[in-house]
Amino acid sequence: MRKNTRVVVAVLSVLLPTIGWSQTPLPNAANSPSTREPAPASGSVGAPCSRPDAGTQTEPPAVGAEPACQKPGQENSNHQSNDSQGEQTKRILWVIPNYRAVSASTKLPPLSVRTEFWLATEDSFDYSSFVLAGLLAGYSQATNSSPEFHDGLAAYGRYYWHSFADEAVGNYFTEAIVPMVTHEDPRYYTLGHGGFVHRTGYAVSRLFITKTDSGGSTFNFAEIAGNLAGAGVANFYYPAPERTLGKTAENWGTQVGVDAIADLLKEFWPDIRHRLLRQR
């Protein structure tokens, strides 16, 4: 994908102001299998109240103490609201694929190689990917980014399939091929707490730091080396004047930049979604 950073930056500049400059912690996600708190035992906070036997004397609770039990249907509404706010959904803005985002404080088992390739396939061949390729092709043609493609409808077709191929090749290298070799986890784990600047720094740092299959942290070879490999493969299907070292570096830098913006959207999407739904 070439020279598309301006398009995504424009979208980001519209969305990010809606979340404010400070954030509250986000709870666990519900979009993936995760570690869950056990159900409250009888007599604990949130458990249904049992009816006392006739004639049984009960003492009133001490001032400031939590109730020993709770009637059915009287769950804490604030807790439910926070759970809804903290969920990562399968799509950002109900259109953009968001299959690799993991909600805050969620622990997941490592991905199998088959699942990694399936995630790359979902990102590459989702219906929105075809629409995005069309928009990028139009932008590239309007700016004449590859003069060798000439003009007209045939030129748009060339821009289209090159844009689509750039994105698909990059997805497979960064989400499946390199993670398979390096045993890295290609998913984005949402931080979900702290201020805007802190969370922004965390999102950008995920370009260079990622989780391993064993749960540790490592340099993000999948992101950096994977996008470099994708830019190198692009030289096989771009015209000869586009195969220079400078063009390859530009393509690689653009891909990494777009991924940085995508990580920012993933980090703040639960907050944006919460604000949008609340304003309805």
Image: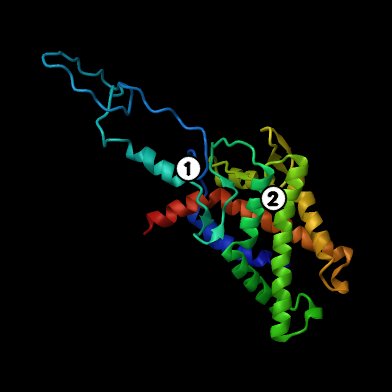
Residue holding disc 1: 30
Quadrant hosting residue 55: top left
Position in image of residue 116 (x %, y %): 66, 47
Q: Which colour assignment does the render follow? A: rainbow
Q: Quadrant of the C terminus?
A: bottom left
Mark 2 crowd level (few <14, some 14–19, many ≥20, 10 Å Cα): many
Position in image of residue 60 (x %, y %): 20, 18
The answer to whether residue 129 is above or below residue 264 is below
Left of 11 or right of it: where is 69?
left
Instruction: Compare residues 184 and 209 and report the one nearer the observer.
Output: 184
Q: Is residue 143 visible?
A: no
Q: Looking at numbered disc 2 in the image, what kind of residue is underneath it?
A: Glu
**Distance of mark 2 from mark 1, alpha carbons?**
22 Å
Left of 186 or right of it: where is 51?
left
Quadrant hosting residue 67: top left
Question: Which numbered circle lies on residue 175?
Answer: 2
Position in image of residue 121 (x %, y %): 65, 56
Question: Which numbered circle lies on residue 273?
Answer: none
Extreme residue toward the left, this view: 55
What secondary structure is marked by label 2? Answer: helix
Q: Looking at numbered disc 1 in the image, what kind of residue is underneath it?
A: Ala
The answer to whether residue 152 is above or below residue 219 is below
Q: Earlier in the sequence, mark 2 or mark 1?
A: 1
The answer to whether residue 165 is above or below residue 114 is below
User: Residue drawn at (65%, 60%), measured in percent from left and top?
Assistant: 124
